[in-house]
Image (cartoon, rainbow, N blue to C red):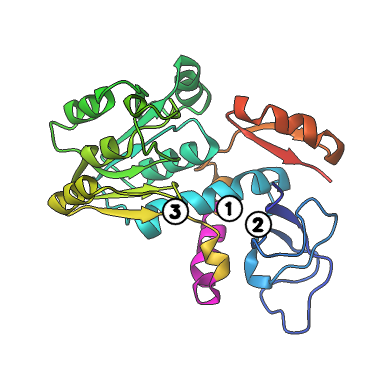
Amino acid sequence: MGLEISGVVQRVGQDVSSLSVNDHVVGMLPLDSPYSGCSRAIILHEYHAARIPSSLSHELAAGSVGDCVRAYTALYYLAHLQRDETVLVLNAASPFGTMVLQLAIQWGASQVFCTVCDKDEQFFLEDVLKLSSVIVMENVQSGNILQKKVLDQTAGLGIDIIVDSGVNMFRVEDGIQVNPQLPHKHDVISMLATGGRWVTSQANLQLDPPDSHLLHLKCASVCHLFEHAWLLSPSRLGCYQHILKDSMEKLCDGKLRVHIQEKVNLEEVPDAMKSLGERWGKVVIEL
């Protein structure tokens, strides 16, 4: 909480060249930062932030920057999305999922699929965010029903790019508790097309020999998604700056949309945190 920030520059160091006093900026705090985004003032490296257009509010900038960086990293830098490829976003009603859907459509994916947990999430995607061109499927935990649906929709070819928000590494029949909203890792691999790319948020993913063998037969690959890696490597800050500037321009032009569920002050944060799992949009802290 509080790593995604937006505000006004108050002072700059003598070697700073990209930002000036009174610039309106957005950025992300690195994980090793001694400061909190909930502070009224922080010290930030100049290349960890970028200017935002004057017509874009700090609320929208801060509420979208983390998911924009994450979505750009997944589709552009890891999956290398090409025009006319197919994309599947698992659990797409999340702020990150909706950002991936919007970018996939804009960048020319031929078909964009997604999974939702219930009809309310489907309504949110189709009627609230107006993503009517996306093929929505309900997430089914039992058996390989989702896999069959995907293969039916793609004439048996599979999906070029799959982006998840985590996976199950065990099945219900293994006697281990699983998350009913997440697919099993082997089902994800089975849905990949030849040469497919799976972008995963599962940090502790373990692939069994049959999983690796299936990936080998498909000439497919697995990419681990960790958007904070940009801030940990000074040599890659140019890519990070590109993401910030391009995503903020798209938000300003209305090409990307973010759903702000609620604005709260610092004293209201504990209560807001209790209901985060029930929300589809972002909660923005105003100081």
- Judged by its main secondary structure, the magenta piece is helix
What's the magenta region?
233-248
Q: Position of residue 39 (x, y in %)?
A: 83, 54
Quarter of the image where one finds residue 88: top left
- Residue placed at 85% from the left, 55% from the top? 40
Vertical comparison of 27 with 236: above or below: above
Do the CB atoms of the residues marked 1 and 3 lie less than 8 Å apart? no
Residue farthest along the top direction in this orientation: 119
Q: Is residue 244 magenta?
A: yes
Q: Residues within 10 Å of mark 2 (few under 14, many from 20)?
A: many
Point out which mark residue 52 bears.
Answer: 2
Residue placed most toward the observer, 108 or 284:
284
Do the CB atoms of the residues marked 3 and 2 lie less than 8 Å apart? no
Q: Is residue 12 rendered to the left or right of residue 78? A: right
State whether residue 56 appears in this view. no
- Residue placed at 79% from the left, 36% from the top? 269
Do the CB atoms of the residues marked 2 and 1 lie less than 8 Å apart? yes
Q: Position of residue 14 (x, y in %)?
A: 78, 84
Q: CA distance from mark 3 to mark 2?
A: 25 Å
Residue assigned mark 3: 225
Vertical comparison of 18 with 138: above or below: below
Residue assigned mark 1: 248
At label 1, which amino acid type do we have? Met
Q: Earlier in the sequence, mark 1 or mark 3?
A: 3
Q: Is residue 193 magenta?
A: no
Point out which mark residue 188 bears.
Answer: none
Q: Position of residue 130 (x, y in %)?
A: 47, 27
- Residue placed at 19% from the left, 38% from the top? 158
At label 3, which amino acid type do we have? Leu
At label 2, which amino acid type do we have? Ile
Residue farthest along the bottom direction in this orientation: 15
Q: Earlier in the sequence, mark 3 or mark 2?
A: 2
